[in-house]
Every structure is written in structure tokens, then in C-alpha cells.
Amino acid sequence: MQRILIVDDDDEIRDLLEFDVSQSGYFVDTAKDGKEGLQKVLNNSYDLVILDVMMPKMNGFDVCKNIRSAKLAIPVLMLTAKGTINDKTIGFDCGADDYLVKPFDVQEVLLRIRVLLRRNQPQNPDSISNEVTNVGDIQIFPDTLECVIVNKKVKLTPTEFEILYCLMQHFNNSVTLATLLDEVWGYDSDEDVRMLRVHVGGLRNKIEPNPKKPQYLHTVTNVGYKLTPFGE
């Protein structure tokens, strides 16, 4: 049974999520503040963390930063009342994989959970035998969510890895925003285009020598993105 940790200081929201998520077939653990949540993540094994932002003792951004600093590739879904693009950018820069704004529909939360868990499942070696994991200057490692580019190894978040993986399957060809949203998140939403762009910015910061002048991950105006693994 997949294990999910819910970290939220709002008793009503935490209890609601605990009930609905557990009723959907997951083992659920909870924490009432950021410090308790981080300790549980570091000392237990979870498949996904649902994380509020504004909490006592340690906010969700700092919890997420510490999770990534510990080299843990657990998917993180942030639930918060802070819904501006700047807040989302901060969350994604901290290593969050997805973001929902309160008030939220529980069914939408369950959808995001399913997508993140499916994305983070280990792949069967037989299923990736025809898929591209090494081309040009770029090599990716699905088991560790790492990327090596010109002898530099970087750790990616699950979402950054999925974006790079998708682009590698279509290297040197343009990939539409709709295709990326569908292949990475499992759905196409105009609202989430900004979320995708934030993740692409984070990916560029890790793989590009100069993110402001990309050599590998290019924007294709009015279309989407293109990966040129040999650089330009």
C-alpha cells in the first residue's frame, strides 16, 4: 500500500484529506506543523507528501527545501491559500512537483495524487528498452532521477525529470505545451501552462551553462519547447 504524509496545521482540512485519501486506498500519516512533518519525512518512508505552506515552526517552503537537500525524490504536492504566480514560483524553486490553491476540490487532489504516484513509479527495464535515455551531451538515470550533462551530474525533481525525459523522446523536434502537460501531468489545462514554464525554468538552471541563453532547452514560440542534446 502506498504511503502518503499530509502536513497541515488546519485540523479540519487535515482530517478531511486524511479521510478521503485513506478511503481511496492509501496509507495516510499526518503532521500538524512543518517541523513535525520534516522529521517524519526524514525518519520514515513515504511515496508522496501533501504539504501546506503557511504553518507554525517551519513553513512548507522550508520543509520542501530540506526534503530536497536530503536528496529525497519524494513527490511533493503543495496545498495553500497563496495562489499568485510568485508564490508558485517559490514553491517550485524549493522542489515542489505540483501546486493546488485552497479552496480545492478533493477529487482534484486525488487526481493529482494519482498522477504524481504514477510518474514516480520505478519503470520496468523491458518497458524502456526502446526509449531514449542517452543522447548527445545528455544522459538521464530513471532510477535516481539524475542527469549527467557534459560530465556534470545534477539531481532533478520528479517533475523536472519527467519534462526532460519527455523532451528527450522527441529530441531535435518541437514538443507542444499540450503534449508536455498530457505526458507529464496526465491532463491538459491552460491554467497549468504557467506551472510548466516555472518547472522548465528550474530545469534550465540545472542543465544550462547560461540559463538566459539556452544551448539545450529552447523555447519554440507559440508551440512549446525543443531539446537539442548536442547543444547549439
Image: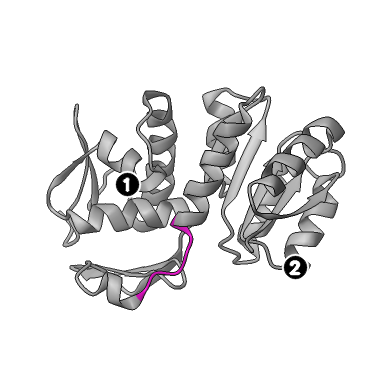
Q: Position of residue 125 (x, y in %)?
A: 33, 77
Of 190 and 174, nearer the camera is 190
Q: Is residue 209 visible?
A: no
| Residue 104 belongs to the span the image colors magenta | no
Q: Quadrant of the C terminus?
A: bottom left
Picture residue at 68% right of the left edge, 25% below the top: 81
Q: Secondary structure at mark 2?
A: loop
Residue 179 position by quadrant: top left
| Count of numbered circles on the image | 2
Q: Position of residue 175 (x, y in %)?
A: 20, 42
Residue 19 located left or right of residue 67: right
Q: Quadrant of the N terminus?
A: bottom right
Give amino acid for label 2: Asn
Q: Which residue is mark 2?
A: 44
Picture residue at 84% right of the left edge, 44% below the top: 33
Q: Are marks 2 and 1 in contact (CB under 8 Å)?
A: no
**Chief secondary structure of the magenta span?**
loop
Picture residue at 47% right of the left edge, 71% below the top: 144
Give amino acid for label 1: Glu
Q: Position of residue 31 (x, y in %)?
A: 83, 49
Q: Secondary structure at mark 1?
A: helix
Q: CA distance from mark 2 to mark 1?
A: 30 Å
Of 31 and 29, nearer the camera is 29
Q: Position of residue 60 (x, y in %)?
A: 71, 42
Q: Is residue 13 above or below residue 124?
A: above
Magenta residue span: 119-124
Q: Crowdedness of circle 2 by 10 Å Cα count: few (<14), some, many (20+)?
A: few
Q: Which residue is mark 1?
A: 183
